[in-house]
Amino acid sequence: MSSIRELLVELTGTVEYAQTIGDEVDLAGSGIDSGDLVRLVLLVEQRTGVEITAEDMEKLRTIGDYERFVAERAAGGVSGGA
């Protein structure tokens, strides 16, 4: 299970949700509300040390988006948005 999926399990309390949603499915359209998306961003920042700006959040819609964003920032040593 990917790190973002693990955070979704922690956030939602259900393994089933994180296992059934596809990597490129829009999280907001899959039942995650805006408050949960903010909490997901905070969890990602806390666990990975990667900063996500409000501008970045607008572009992060799927698990795949989050995974790529974190991987790119972690590999490049970038801790902030563009």
Image: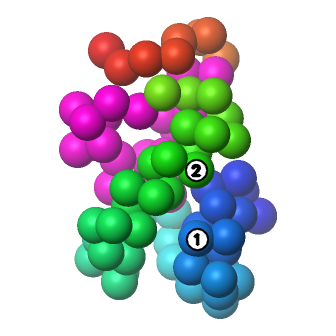
Horizontally, is 66 left or right of 20 in the view?
left
Q: Which mark is residue 11?
A: 1
Pointers 2 and 1 in contact (CB under 8 A)? yes
Q: Which mark is residue 70?
A: none
Quadrant for the N terminus in the image: bottom right
Q: Provide residue 26's location: percent of width, then percent of height.
A: 33, 67
The residue that label 2 is drawn on is 43
Residue 41 visible here: yes
Please tell me which residue is depicted at 65% across the width and 17% down the height of the picture. Answer: 75
Q: Magenta stretch: dominant SS?
A: helix
Q: Is 67 a magenta residue? A: yes
Please tell me which residue is depicted at 26% across the width and 36% down the height of the picture. Answer: 54
Q: Provide residue 49's location: percent of width, then percent of height.
A: 63, 28
Magenta range is 52-74
Q: Amino acid at mark 2?
A: Leu
Residue 71 visible here: no
Please tell me which residue is depicted at 57% across the width and 79% down the height of the picture. Answer: 12
Quadrant for the C terminus in the image: top left
Q: Provide residue 27's location: percent of width, then percent of height.
A: 37, 68
Q: Nearer the viewer, residue 8 or 1?
A: 8
Q: Provide residue 51's location: percent of width, then percent of height.
A: 48, 27
The residue carrying pointer 2 sits among few (fewer than 14), some (14 to 19) or many (20 or more) residues within 10 Å by Cα, namely some
Number of marks: 2
Q: Amino acid at mark 1?
A: Leu
Q: Is residue 47 above or below residue 72?
A: below
Residue found at the very far right of the displayed protein:
1
Q: Secondary structure at mark 1?
A: helix
The answer for how far apart the CA atoms under marks 2 and 1 are is 9 Å
* Snapshot quadrant of residue 18: bottom right
Q: Is residue 64 above or below residue 70?
A: below
